Amino acid sequence: MAGDLITTMADLKEKEALEIVQDRLGAGDDPVSILNDARRAMEIVGERFANGEYFIPDLIYSSEILREITEIVKPKLTKEAEVKRLGKVIIGTVAGDIHDIGKDIVTFMLDVNGFEVYDLGVDVPAKEFVKKIKETNAGIVGLSGLLTLTIDSMKETVEAIKAAGLRGKVKIMIGGTPIDEVVRKYTGADAYGPDAMAGVTLAKKWIGGK
Amino acid sequence: MKMEKSPEELYKEREKRVNDAIQLKVPDRVPFFPFTHFFAVKYTGMTFEEAFYDPDKFLAANKKMNMDLEPDLYFPPMFVLNTPGQVLEALDVKVFKWPGHGVSPYHTHQFVEGEYIKADEYDALLKDPSDFLMRTIIPRVCGALEPFTTLPPLRSFRFSYLGIVLNYALYGMPEVGNAFPEAAGAFESVLKAVREMMKWGTSGLAFDQEMRELGFPAVAGGFTGAPFDLFSFVRGMRGSMLDMYRQPDKLLEVMERMLPRVIWAGVTTAKMSGNPGVFMGLHRGTDTFMSTKQFETFYWPTLKRLTLALIDEGLIPFLGWEEKCDQRLEFLTELPKGKVICFFAGKTDVFKAKEILGNTMCIAGNMPISLLQTGTPEQVKDYAKRLIDVVGKDGGFIMSCSSVMDEADPELVKVWADFTKEYGVYR
């Protein structure tokens, strides 16, 4: 008998999880329900990361398992799975910096916590953030940076959003190695998050989730 | 009237100050070590691109900066500009973006994360690491050396008189023989790169000698790193972390095989330089990168043995933790007393570190770079005072900062330097 996909996947048992998926498909199970279970497992992974039980290797591994499951299930899908989203968040590593690890973790955590995330990538010019705000009407912008040069890039990005007349429409959160409350004040952002979970907490507070 | 001290006396005084701090004795005052990195660029108003393509100008900028700041330890410019632009170009290096090549002329070089070793290549790597490095990894990370893939296996260089020539059968094969003109082109790129590196190496060693004559000790002369980090840079973070789950034994075996090489690198570079300090930037073993269990399994064992081996050689390991490592402090107490400098960048709680490590090792770092970049003189002095009062209590502390100073405000840095030297005196 097939075990529980949610638990198995959340416990990062790759082989067993894939076997369960194959068994369930073989038994004629609805592919959408399999993907929903996989999504629920990723939520648990996110919770464990937030609790300090899981770390980057575990997030990477869980994403890899999810990718494999999606690959198996996708050809069988006849309709797209419906996902209810709490709200939209634009995220990116600011101009001048090509590091993506921190940004990717925040993206992961926002995604598993129900946000629709527009990830603009790395070395993102201020005008790209402005363009995306206009295009998506997202209420939250997250700016990431590893290098000390990003302190000024973040300030410039916040200023560009202001100059475009959009500052009142978005909340801006910042994070990364050199970022702290001193930098938050300097850049004019709304909040600074010391870790990925802080980003989720801020987004929920601002968008009116739980 | 007070006599001016000679540079020689100043050198000895600074060296003693630092050694006292390392050996957990109380020095005359808290030593000052600005982790300047590329700060000389901003300090003298040049560009990063100029630093990369006119490295002698970068050295001159460092000299001016050091003469003005008068640090007790200076950060050797060779450690940050280890490969000038001409060399990166000659080899067509793929793993860096550098000023004018993928990043703006006004910003520092950056590493390009990638999977330069694939998941199924462990066996080839372990079978003959030098061959794998030469014919597989190097062609992937240096575009100009791509033809190295066509070289015959290093195993074919046999132990015998005339070693290489005897393999006529091998070189007679068209796929090897015909590839030689291409490989010859690659060797020309190597030659060009080596000539540039020789120029730069000569200038760099002369710089360190000049600094010594002017009275300034360098923080380190040697250079090495933790096996997990070094391997993870080529296997990729994603790859190396997936391997923790999928092929942990092979991952551990690679690090085991790397250990003698990283020890050799640290010992050799330090002994050649005549400076016992061995610099290690530690990247992916910190709190946010992996769990304590993962650290204990994959990161710490080889790093610890590397550190102990360097100490055995009479060297002074500089453990430069690049991010928060509150969860790693207990592990560090396993190291012998008074033999290393532990530099904490990022958001490590150094006040807590003092409690845990105060009797084991010298702590350096922690002046927030945010304050040195955007703060006020008062904020800088207040924080420095707290560091000196708490972490500097009874010695064992070197004043330094929480990140590189590339974008720091020169005026605030001056305030920080002056305050440390004035308030940091042990009375």
Image (cartoon, grey):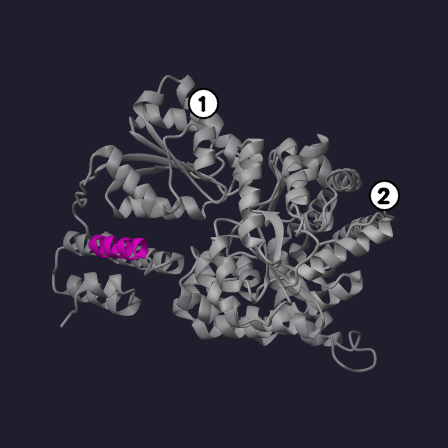
Q: Is residue B132 visible?
A: yes
Q: Position of residue A139 (x, y in %)?
A: 29, 29
Local SS, label 1: helix
The residue mark sitting in front, 2 or 1, is 2
Q: Is residue B58 magenta?
A: no
The percent position of residue A8, horizontal first and vertical second, equals 23, 66
Asked whether residue A48 is drawn in magenta, I would say yes
Chain letter of disc 2?
B
Q: How many marks?
A: 2
Amino acid found under the numbered disc labelled 1: Glu
| Foreground of the two, A42 or A48 | A48
Q: Which image quarter is the N terminus of chain B in?
A: top right
Q: Nearer the viewer, residue A74 or B293?
A: B293
**Residue at the spot of label 2:** B2
Looking at the picture, how far across and down is residue B51, in whole percent? 72, 38
**Chain letter belonging to callout 1:** A
Q: Nearer the viewer, residue B338 or A176?
A: B338
Give the magenta part as a residue range. Answer: A38-51
Q: Position of residue B147 (x, y in %)?
A: 67, 57
- Label 2 sits on a secondary structure element that is loop
- Whole-Å distance between the Cαs marked 2 and 1? 53 Å
Q: Say if B44 sits above or below B263 in the image.
A: above
Q: Is residue B344 left or right of residue A135?
A: right
Q: Is residue B289 left or right of residue B190?
A: left
